[in-house]
C-alpha cells in the first residue's frame, strides 16, 4: 500500500485544488442547534481520508453537509464553503451532487427493504443518462467486487444480513459512477471479520477504480489502518489532523481513541479524572 | 333457534334457491367494487410514495369531475376537456409539492395527515367556487343499457367501468414494477433519506405521484360522475375506500383492486340476504364492520407489505 499511497500523494500535490475542500463550515439544525462549529478538511483525488471521533462529535453531520442531505433534516450550512473540484456546491441538491460524482453511503445502511438487492443497486443509477448498456456494465462491476450480492440478487434487501446490506448500500452508491464516496460508519453493527472484508473491498475500489473516499468511523483502529489522512472531531470542531501513520503514533490518540496507554493499567478513577482534565478544548 | 335460522340457514337456502339471482347479486357487487377500487387506488399510490394517508383523495375525485364537467359545459370537446383537466391535476400536484410537501419534509406522518385534511377543504371549496355546487350531469357517451348473457343481466356502464379499471391497473403495475421511475417511486416509499442519498429527487417524484393519483382521481370522477351525477357526495365515497384499504393493504395496488371487489360483493350479498333480518340498509355500515374484524387478524391487509423484521 505504501508505494501506491506515496504515488497518489504526489499526484495529489501536483493538482492544485483538492477534490473536496470543506472550508470552515458551521451547521445549525432547526435554526437553533449549533452542531458544527467550524470544520475544515480536504480530500485529495484518489485519497482516503477518515473523520474520527466519538458519538455526537459531528462526523455524520459533516458528511451530510457535503452531500447536502442536511436540508431534508432541517439542517443548514450557515457559514463557510464546500467546494468540489474548485466549484462551490453548498447550495446544490443531493441530486445535483450525485450527478457531479459525489455520493453518500448513509450510516445504518438504509437499504430499500422491499426492493430486491438488484433493484436496490439499480436505484443507484437513477441520475445516469448514459444508457442501459453502461448501467449493466456497472452492475457487473459491482457484482465483481461483491460476489455475495450476485448470489442474493433476487432476495428482498430487508431479509439479507447486515453485512450484505452494507455491501448493497456501497454497491448502490457505486452504480452512480461516483468519483467520491462519503462513507458513513460502514463498520456499524458488523462482526470484525466482516468489517475487515468490507474495508478490503473499499480499498480495492479506491486503488483499482480510483474512487476517492471520505470515511466517517468510530472504529479508529481500523479507520487509521485503511485511511491515509485523518481528522479528529470533538464537539463539532476538528481538534487534530494529520497523516494516518502519525496519528496512530500520537500519544493522545492512543489514549483517547485506541485505548492504548503507555503507563500501564490505571485505576478507573484515575482514568476518569485524567480524561476530564485533559481535553483538547 | 329462530335466530339461528334467520342468520345462518335461511340466507343460504335463498342463495341455493335461485343461483342466477345470486350470480347477479355477486356481479352487481363486483361492479360496485370496481368503483371503490378506483378511489382506493389513488390512496394507495400516494401512500406508497409519500407515506401519507391522503384524506383529500375523495375531494380530488370531486374536483377532477367538477373541472371536467365545467369545461364540457363551456362547450369544450370531450377529449380536449379530459386533457385540460389532466393538465389542471398536474398543476395541482406541483402546487401541493411546493406549498405543502416541501415545507413539511421530514415531519411526522400525523402532521402530513392533518395537512391532507386541510387540503380536502381546499379542494372542496375551490371546486365549488369555480364551478358551483349544483348537481351536474356528466355524459361522456358511455352506453347505459342493460343486456343479458346466459340469463344474467349486465349493465354496459358497469362493464365499461370494470374494463377501464382493469386497464388502469395493468398500466400502473407495469409502471411501478418495470420502469426506472417506478423503481424510484418504490425506493422513495421505502426510505426517503436513502432515496435522496442516491440522487433521486424527491420533488420530482412527489409531483409524479400526485399527478398519477390525480389521473386516477379523474378516471374515478368520470366513472362515479357518470353513474351518480357530479355532486358533493362524491367526497363521501372516499370514506368507502377506507374499508377497502384496510382489507387490501395500504401499500398494495392489487390489494386495492381485490379489496374493492371483495367489499363490493360482500356489501351486496349481505344487503340482499342478511339485510332483511336487520331491517335493511346494512350496505352502508357492513363494510366498516368487516374491516374492523379484519384489522384484528391481519392489520397489514391481505396484500399489504409484510412488516419486515430481522431477528
Image (tube, grey):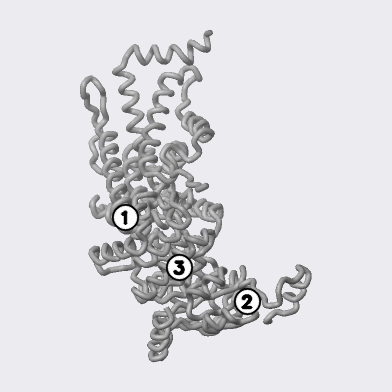
Left or right: A39 as drawn, with respect to A142: right
Label 3: chain?
A
Identified at 29% across, 34% down, the residue is: B158
CA–CA distance in space, label 1 to label 2: 65 Å
Identified at 56% across, 52% down, the residue is: B110
Indicate the position of residue A68 as horizontal and vertical percent values. 47, 72
Label 1: chain?
B
Q: Are marks 2 and 3 on the same chain?
A: yes
Identified at 35% across, 64% down, the residue is: A145
CA–CA distance in space, label 3 to label 1: 51 Å
Dot 1 falls on a residue whose secondary structure is: helix
Indicate the position of residue A155 as horizontal and vertical percent values. 37, 49
Q: In the picture, residue B259 is in which quadrant? A: top left
Mark 2 or mark 3, earlier in chain: 3
Indicate the position of residue B20 as horizontal and vertical percent values. 29, 18
Res B30 visible: yes
Q: Say which quadrant the N terminus of chain A sits in.
A: bottom left
Left or right: B58 as drawn, with respect to A135: right
Question: Callout 2 environment at 10 Å: few (<14), some (14 to 19), or many (20+)?
Answer: some
Residue B86 image label = 1
Furthest residue to the front? A264
Q: In the picture, residue A218 is in which quadrant? A: bottom right
Label 2: chain?
A
Residue located beneath label 3 in the image: A199
Question: Callout 1 environment at 10 Å: few (<14), some (14 to 19), or many (20+)?
Answer: many
Q: Are marks 1 and 2 on the same chain?
A: no
Res A86 visible: no
Residue A254 image label = 2
Q: Are marks 3 and 1 on the same chain?
A: no
Q: Badges 1 and 2: C-beta atoms under 8 Å apart?
A: no
Q: Is residue B238 above or below residue B113?
A: above
Dot 3 falls on a residue whose secondary structure is: helix
Amino acid at each position: 500500500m505504501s508505494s501506491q499511497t506515496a504515488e497518489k500523494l504526489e499526484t495529489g500535490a501536483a493538482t492544485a485544488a483538492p477534490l473536496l475542500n470543506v472550508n470552515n463550515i458551521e451547521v445549525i439544525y432547526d435554526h437553533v442547534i449549533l452542531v458544527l462549529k467550524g470544520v475544515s478538511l480536504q480530500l485529495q483525488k484518489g485519497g482516503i481520508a477518515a473523520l474520527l471521533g466519538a458519538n455526537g462529535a459531528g462526523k455524520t453531520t459533516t458528511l451530510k453537509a457535503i452531500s447536502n442531505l442536511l436540508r431534508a433534516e432541517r439542517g443548514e450550512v450557515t457559514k463557510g464553503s464546500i467546494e468540489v473540484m474548485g466549484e462551490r456546491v453548498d447550495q446544490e441538491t443531493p441530486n445535483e451532487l450525485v450527478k457531479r460524482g459525489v455520493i453518500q453511503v448513509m450510516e445504518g445502511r438504509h437499504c430499500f427493504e422491499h426492493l430486491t438487492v438488484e433493484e436496490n443497486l439499480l436505484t443507484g443509477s437513477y441520475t445516469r443518462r448514459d444508457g442501459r448498456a453502461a448501467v449493466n456494465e456497472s452492475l457487473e462491476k459491482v457484482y465483481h467486487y461483491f460476489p455475495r450480492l450476485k448470489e442474493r440478487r433476487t432476495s428482498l434487501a430487508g431479509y439479507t444480513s447486515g453485512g450484505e446490506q452494507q455491501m448493497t448500500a456501497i454497491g448502490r452508491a457505486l452504480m452512480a459512477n461516483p468519483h467520491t464516496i462519503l462513507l458513513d460508519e460502514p463498520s456499524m453493527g458488523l462482526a470484525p471479520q466482516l468489517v475487515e472484508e468490507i474495508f478490503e473491498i473499499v480499498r480495492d475500489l479506491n486503488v483499482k477504480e480510483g474512487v476517492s473516499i471520505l470515511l466517517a468511523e468510530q472504529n479508529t483502529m481500523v479507520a487509521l489502518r485503511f485511511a491515509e489522512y485523518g481528522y479528529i472531531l470533538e464537539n463539532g470542531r476538528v481538534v487534530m489532523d494529520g497523516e494516518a501513520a502519525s496519528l496512530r503514533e500520537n500519544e493522545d490518540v492512543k489514549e483517547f481513541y485506541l485505548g492504548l496507554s503507555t503507563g500501564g493499567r490505571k485505576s478507573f478513577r484515575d482514568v476518569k479524572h485524567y480524561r476530564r482534565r485533559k481535553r483538547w478544548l | 333457534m329462530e335466530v339461528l335460522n334467520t342468520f345462518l340457514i335461511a340466507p343460504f337456502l335463498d342463495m341455493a334457491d335461485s343461483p342466477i339471482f345470486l350470480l347477479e347479486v355477486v356481479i352487481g357487487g363486483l361492479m360496485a367494487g370496481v368503483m371503490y377500487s378506483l378511489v382506493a387506488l389513488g390512496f394507495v399510490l400516494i401512500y406508497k410514495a409519500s407515506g401519507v394517508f391522503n384524506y383529500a383523495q375523495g375531494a380530488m375525485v370531486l374536483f377532477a369531475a367538477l373541472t371536467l364537467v365545467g369545461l364540457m359545459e363551456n362547450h369544450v370537446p370531450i377529449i380536449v376537456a379530459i386533457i385540460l383537466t389532466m393538465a389542471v391535476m398536474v398543476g395541482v400536484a406541483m402546487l401541493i409539492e411546493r406549498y405543502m410537501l416541501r415545507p413539511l419534509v421530514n415531519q411526522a406522518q400525523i402532521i402530513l395527515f392533518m395537512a391532507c385534511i386541510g387540503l380536502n377543504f381546499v379542494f372542496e371549496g375551490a371546486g365549488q367556487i369555480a364551478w358551483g355546487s349544483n348537481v351536474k350531469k356528466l355524459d361522456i357517451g358511455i352506453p347505459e343499457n342493460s343486456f343479458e348473457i346466459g340469463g344474467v343481466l349486465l349493465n354496459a356502464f358497469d362493464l365499461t367501468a370494470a374494463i377501464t379499471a382493469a386497464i388502469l391497473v395493468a398500466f400502473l403495475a407495469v409502471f411501478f414494477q418495470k420502469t426506472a421511475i417506478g423503481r424510484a417511486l418504490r425506493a422513495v416509499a421505502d426510505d426517503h433519506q436513502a432515496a435522496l442519498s442516491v440522487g433521486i429527487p424527491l420533488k420530482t417524484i412527489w409531483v409524479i405521484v400526485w399527478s398519477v393519483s390525480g389521473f386516477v382521481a379523474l378516471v374515478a370522477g368520470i366513472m362515479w360522475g357518470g353513474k351518480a351525477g357530479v355532486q358533493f357526495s362524491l367526497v363521501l365515497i372516499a370514506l368507502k375506500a377506507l374499508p377497502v384499504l384496510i382489507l387490501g393493504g395500504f401499500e398494495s395496488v392489487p390489494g386495492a383492486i381485490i379489496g374493492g371487489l371483495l367489499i363490493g360483493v360482500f356489501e351486496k350479498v349481505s344487503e340482499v340476504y342478511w339485510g332483511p333480518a336487520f331491517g335493511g340498509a346494512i350496505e352502508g355500515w357492513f363494510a366498516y364492520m368487516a374491516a374492523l374484524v379484519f384489522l384484528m387478524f391481519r392489520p397489514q391487509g391481505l396484500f399489504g407489505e409484510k412488516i419486515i423484521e430481522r431477528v
